[in-house]
Amino acid sequence: MIAFLSVALFTTVSATTIADAETARVAYSNCLVDFTTAQLDAKTGTSAFKKAAKDACAAERKAMISAMEKDEMAFGSSASEATSFATEEADGVLFSFTDSYAGYASSSTRPVKQ
């Protein structure tokens, strides 16, 4: 009975941290959509956009990294492993915008929110 309760509690905690990490990732991505759209509307050049994007949505990025660290540590990662993984994931979200910016600008298209 105790083992069952332990597994149930771990599963509930894990599901909650995964949901928190996904919610934070979507919030960061959606913030970058707004930032990217504003930069496209202002006709910001690609290199200027890439520089500015690094500092855009800092609070959302920090929240995403924090939630992902918590998630990774719940699965047994060390703090340094969790930080490294979470930072790589946040960098991946940012890269998807910086890598696509020139394409959006040349095609007059815009990213969409999730």
Image (tube, rainbow, N blue to C red):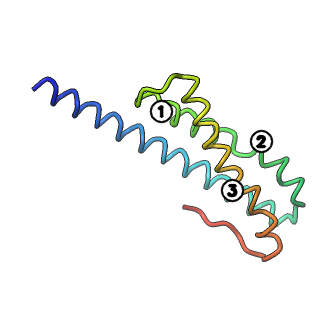
Total numbered circles? 3
Find the distance from the CA under tag 2 to the CA under tag 1.
Answer: 25 Å
- The residue to which callout 3 is attached is 96
Quadrant (top left/top right/bottom left/bottom right) for the C terminus: bottom right
User: Which residue shows up at 41% across the image and 37% down it?
Assistant: 17
User: What is the x, y in percent for residue 18?
Assistant: 42, 42
- The CA distance from mark 3 to mark 1 is 22 Å
Q: Of all residues shown, which one is farthest toward the left? A: 1
Q: Which x, y percent locates residue 63?
A: 58, 37
Viewport quadrant of the N terminus:
top left
Is label 3 in contact with label 1 (beta carbons under 8 Å)?
no
Q: Is 38 located above or below residue 110 in the figure? A: above
According to the picture, the residue beneath numbered tag 2 turns out to be: 55
Which amino acid, by three-letter code, is at mark 3? Ser
Q: Amino acid at mark 1?
A: Glu
The residue that label 1 is drawn on is 72
**Camera-side residue of 92 and 62:** 92
Image vertical order of residue 51 relative to residue 107, above or below:
above
Residue visible at 55% across and 47% down in the picture: 25
Q: Few, some or many C-alpha atoms within 10 Å of disc 2 (few <14, some 14-19, many ≥20)?
A: few
| Neighbour tally class for label 3: few under 14, some 14-19, many 20 plus, Cα within 10 Å | few
Drawn side of residue 20 relative to residue 16, left or right: right
Instruction: Tell me which label, 3 or 1, sits earlier in the chain.
Output: 1
- Pinpoint residue 102: horizontal percent, then vertical percent: 82, 65
In the visual, does 29 lie left or right of 41?
Answer: left
Left or right: 112 in relation to 99:
left
